[in-house]
Amino acid sequence: MRAVLLDQTGPSENLRLGDAPIVPPGPGEIRVNVKRASINPIDLYIRSGTVPMALPMPFTPGCDFAGVVEEVGSGVEGFRVGQRVWGSNQGLLGRQGTLREQATIQAHFAYPAPEGVSDDSLAAAALTGITAHLALFVNAQVKAGDTVVIQGGTGGVGSMAIQMAKAVGARVITTVRSEEKANLALSLGAEKAILFGGKTFEEIRAYTGGKGVDAWIETQREPDFLNIVPTMAPRGRIVILAGRTSQPLFPVGPFYVKGLSLKGFAMFNATPAEQAACAVDISRWLAEGALKVQVGQTFDLDQAVEAHRFLEENTLGFAGKLVGKVLVRVS
């Protein structure tokens, strides 16, 4: 079968399209005919070696997938041959990824596809949707009536988080980098979209009438705690999910006097059960139309180098040419 392969970590040019053997599913696994995959920043970090992980070489990158079950391993319940499925959590921690025509996947990382939802939407919603759900509801404990700030509201995670917070009745303030992105964020359900700039935090505080925000979802790599902390309401919750090398200043006194909490997490450290709970809501919201996925660009499997380079230029280089997810058409 065709697969994108990596023989040594490094630049995107190290990726190549080659042949790989089909791996039969073992106990607790399913084999999936992958239709769509998507690319996330973690895929770039693993491919480049920025995030060191033990990788089976040659290695196939890719966390997310949507496809059809081709074979079911022993002990697996709830899946059948021919069933459409989606999921994430591949291509890391020793697991082969999804930029291949056939992927063998642990069944607890796969979820039944809801009727009427496209493979594009399912693949694009996987990692970003699960991450946003964990950030909002497991870590920030967001509920109806809360005021939530979501940094970068038109990014992969941010656009998911806006819609999910809106779905449970929270008020959403978001930050963006252009008027075009502000309009998109508002169309996704944000109540207020504020342009990044020198007065961003003043505008947020003014919009809350000085009460502050209940939850802050930080998707940017350089959190500004000196301004975030004064913007929080008493007992507010700050959640960090980016910034691996960031070492910002932190105002300890104002933080503990307000009774604030700060949590950080990485999606792939969540248990299969925690992620499956997220998938239930994501599937339902996608089917109901309450959750819409932004697809920025789609590449073919033999364009993996270009796909990685494009995402790198836009997420790390701030080229500004991407709104939404980068998809790969596998088969």
Image (cartoon, rainbow, N blue to C red):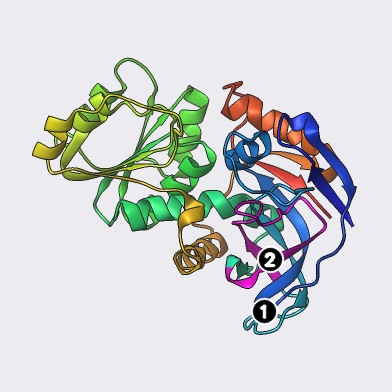
Q: Residue at position x 59%, y 33% from top?
A: 50
Residue 325 visible in the picture: no
Vertical placement of 326 versus 82: above or below? Answer: above
Please provide the residue range marked out in magenta: 84-108
Where is residue 328 shown, x and y percent of the image? 75, 45
Q: Is residue 107 magenta?
A: yes
Of the image marks 1 and 2, the number of the one nearer the N terminus = 1
Q: Quadrant of residue 301?
A: top right
Say left or right for 227 vs 47.
left
Measured as percent of width and height from the top left, residue 86 is found at 65, 63
Amino acid type at mark 2? Ile
Q: Secondary structure at mark 1?
A: loop
Left or right position of 172 against 118: left
Horizontal side of 272 relative to 89 (left or right) equals left
Q: Residue at x 87, y 60 (%)?
A: 21
For the view shown, which residue lies furthest in the top direction? 198
| C-alpha gap between disc 1 and disc 2 | 12 Å
Give the answer, above or below, for where 258 lies relative to 253.
below
Residue at (32, 55) in percent of width and height: 169
Determine which of the numbered discs, if any, sits on residue 105 in the image.
2
Tell me which amino acid carries mark 1. Answer: Phe
Q: x, y percentage for residue 217?
A: 36, 41
Task: Note whether residue 282 is visible.
Answer: yes
| Vertical placement of residue 143 versus 23, above or below | above
Q: Name the residue that disc number 1 marks.
A: 79
